[in-house]
Amino acid sequence: MPSPLDLGGDVVDLLRALIDIESVSGQETAIADQIEAALRPYAHLSVVRDGNVIVARTDLSRSERVVIAGHIDTVPIADNVPSSTTGTGDEAIVWGRGSCDMKGGVAVQLSVAAALTAPTRDVTWIFYDNEEVEEELNGLNRIAREHPDYLHGAFAVLCEPSNAGIEGGCQGTMRLMVELEGVAAHSARSWKGHNAIHDAGAVLQLLADYQARHVEVEGLTYREGLNAVRITGGIAGNVIPDRCSIEVNYRFAPDKSPAQAEAYLREVFAGFPVRITDVAAGARPGLDQPAAAEFLAAVGGQASAKFGWTDVARFSAMGVPAVNFGPGDPNKAHADDEFCPAADVYSCREALLRWLG
Amino acid sequence: MPSPLDLGGDVVDLLRALIDIESVSGQETAIADQIEAALRPYAHLSVVRDGNVIVARTDLSRSERVVIAGHIDTVPIADNVPSSTTGTGDEAIVWGRGSCDMKGGVAVQLSVAAALTAPTRDVTWIFYDNEEVEEELNGLNRIAREHPDYLHGAFAVLCEPSNAGIEGGCQGTMRLMVELEGVAAHSARSWKGHNAIHDAGAVLQLLADYQARHVEVEGLTYREGLNAVRITGGIAGNVIPDRCSIEVNYRFAPDKSPAQAEAYLREVFAGFPVRITDVAAGARPGLDQPAAAEFLAAVGGQASAKFGWTDVARFSAMGVPAVNFGPGDPNKAHADDEFCPAADVYSCREALLRWLG
């Protein structure tokens, strides 16, 4: 067992210690044990361990409760553990798997949870497993199913990397298949068949000509997208293809429900055989909530829209508005050269202290 | 060793005997041995064995020589050897691997070669191996390279199945790849990339709108075709694809050379990145040759254009006009329920006797 996590020390040292405990999805027990052991001594927190999820709450009977959550798993190691640093002080960069996605955020959570003995709002700190894998395994998803009360709050912050800025809500995502059927024939006698790949031309032209919406929701501008992400058709160099399948991904702003998104796509693809294969609802940014407004003021700067889908949508589905806010560049998540600037970690920590202190 | 082939008996019995000697491509030695042994006793034929190719020639110093060729290999057995028959006499159907493609034609060749001791034209009978596999192995191709003199003649008949009618020449075939490149991006931020699959829309619309030529060559009408036969693009459901490849097959009438076909396609696809991957020249039907005209008269009926590519193109490349003429329905070639009508076998045999007798 490595030395215990020191929640009262430097938050960047804490980040390095967290990286050094490998926690690829499915193997989070060691890091969950360490987090639980580090939180238990704090009398202002009541700590619950549920599988590899840890929930630590203040119970000060404040008028409002906020939830601050982060996942403790990472994608597989790429020869980037243990951690390393370059530079010093505020210029330091911390390198290693999970530095960005999202042990930087977890370090901020732990450090602030320990420091804030009497926050102005009650806080539920959540540390969960299996975010990087199938939805059924996702720890936050499991808690939402089995203990929805743990997630209750007026507002939620997910400490996913956002360059230490606030990214509000998230877009929804829907996948569909356009499955075209033709009639096979030898390509030397093509008029005896019907070419399903040729029929795909009209679908792809529609997509090429499509003008995606820019939508303002609660002051944030979301950019939608409608794209073919895969196409496949044909079985041999001398056969007129009788099948062609196009997989399309629709990213839709959080002003649309999944049902509205589906109805819209069925209209866009009217006349083509369409099958919806996958959907995840978006999340409104919730920036019209008082807790959010004060959070924005504490952080400073301008909130921006989150385009990718994140677990904020799980809070949104439970009626809890949520934003992403954490150290590190989301473009470095999962990269072999994943890193997190120390300055981001410090500034996120200070922003949370300003908001809740 | 099975009983020797009887070239003087019933041609349908001979067909059954040929089917019963398995001769999947690459395993033609047994059938080649039998054919050689059966031809050697005929004093009017000089027989050469070269690998598993057998060439049997009359040398009567006629003013003209014709070549009549057929392959002795088959695609793999599908539980359809030994042969069987249903019906009797002219109504009989012979079932089994190779019955249609093309031991019916080989039986006709052998029967007529034996019977015609003094043909009105000198005849070169060719029996060759490895037609159903890669071009480099093709026995006729090898002979064309090593002994082009064996293939010399004013006219050639390839006894491939043609429902006992004359199919003249063959179309050429060219394959090309249209390889579109884009810029990858996460599909939640699609505007940072460029979708290569969307670019395929214009190519497919061009193909969908394309009007293929109907071309008359020496009295036969060829129907061209330009078709996408395969398309592939995309790597994941959340990535804007940076590549999309379309494989296109052009079947062109024998009035065009491969170079002309390529120049034409480069014009059709002007502006798109095109790479030619494969080409086989077509063959003119040669029906303007006197030998062909007399052949047509002997066979009767109407000649039609051959759309698929066959080895007649090898003769054509050597300046020898060639047609397909043999028993059996080409649509049954390679089928598990491959068969050949006895009536086709008899009528092809009689037509050759009328022409050369």
Image: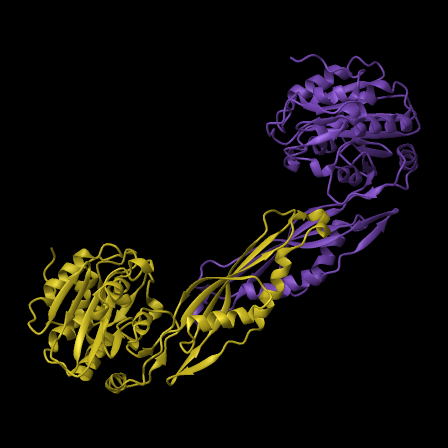
Chain colours: A yellow, B purple
Q: Position of residue A44 (x, y in %)?
A: 8, 74
Residue sitting at the far front: B87
Report whether A328 appears left or right of A176: left
Q: Quadrant of residue A117?
A: bottom left
Give coordinates of residue A321: x percent, y percent.
30, 78
Q: Is residue B190 visible?
A: no
Q: How many marks?
A: 0
Q: Name the residue rendered at 18%, 56% in the picture.
A: A29
Q: Is residue B314 above or below residue A51?
A: above
Q: Is residue A87 toward the left or the right of residue B322 in the image?
A: left
> Residue A56, relative to residue A321: is it above or below?
above
Give the percent coordinates (x, y) of residue B311: 74, 37
Residue A340: quarter of image: bottom left
Residue A272 relative to residue B110: left or right: left
Task: Determine whether, in the image, residue A70 is placed left or right of residue B156.
Answer: left
- Image quarter hosting the C terminus of chain B: top right
Above or below — where is B39 with respect to A261? above
Q: Is residue B241 above or below residue B289?
A: below
Report the front residue among A250 and A314. A314
Tell me the quarter of the image containing the N terminus of chain B: top right
Coordinates of residue B68 in the picture (x, y in percent)? 81, 29
Using the rendered image of the protein, determine whether residue A131 is visible from the camera's viewpoint: yes
Which of these two is toward me, B189 or A42? A42
Task: Name the quadrant containing residue B46.
Answer: top right
> Going 69% across and 35% down the picture, which residue do you hit?
B333
